[in-house]
Image (cartoon, rainbow, N blue to C red):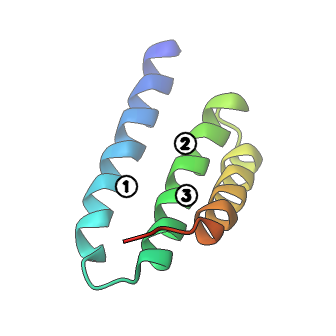
């Protein structure tokens, strides 16, 4: 069972990484939102033991945090 969970986490991270390739024309705030949502989904899924509610909740919280992060250039 632990192998399946690690496979799911790895597949999720790979999907998020491939999805970020299409973000080249996004604003920094949009990229931060997407990255925050992806990281939040992975973390929420890991903390909740893979429950859908934990994954979706983590994505929502991560997206909001990523959206509010201010980057300097």
Q: Are marks 2 and 3 in contact (CB under 8 Å)?
A: no
- Pinpoint residue 31: horizontal percent, then vertical percent: 43, 71
46 with respect to 20 (left or right): right
> In the figure, residue 11 lies in which quadrant?
top left
Mark toward the viewer: 3 or 1 = 3
Q: Which residue is mark 3?
A: 36
Badge 2 marks a residue whose secondary structure is helix
Question: Around disc 1, counting alpha carbons within 10 Å, would you say few (fewer than 14), some (14 to 19), or many (20 or more)?
Answer: some
Badge 3 marks a residue whose secondary structure is helix
Q: Which residue is mark 2?
A: 42
36 with respect to 24 (left or right): right
In whole angstroms, how far apart are the C-alphas of marks 3 and 1?
A: 11 Å
- Pinpoint residue 39: horizontal percent, then vertical percent: 52, 48
- Pinpoint residue 22: horizontal percent, then vertical percent: 25, 74
Residue lying at 61% horizontally and 71% vertically, measured from the top left:
67
Q: Are marks 1 and 2 in contact (CB under 8 Å)?
A: yes
Q: Nearer the viewer, residue 6 or 65?
A: 65
Badge 1 marks a residue whose secondary structure is helix
14 with respect to 36 (left or right): left
Question: Around disc 3, counting alpha carbons within 10 Å, would you say few (fewer than 14), some (14 to 19), or many (20 or more)?
Answer: many
Vertical placement of residue 54 versus 20, above or below: above
Q: Which residue is mark 1?
A: 16
In whole angstroms, how far apart are the C-alphas of marks 1 and 2?
A: 10 Å
Vertical placement of residue 31 versus 35, above or below: below
């Amino acid at each position: 069972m632990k192998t399946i969970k690690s496979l799911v986490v790895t597949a999720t991270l790979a999907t998020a990484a491939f999805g970020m390739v299409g973000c080249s024309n996004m604003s920094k705030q949009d990229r931060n939102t997407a990255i925050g949502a992806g990281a939040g989904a992975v973390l929420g899924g890991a903390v909740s033991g893979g429950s859908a509610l934990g994954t979706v909740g983590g994505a929502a919280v991560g997206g909001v945090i990523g959206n509010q992060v201010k980057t300097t250039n």
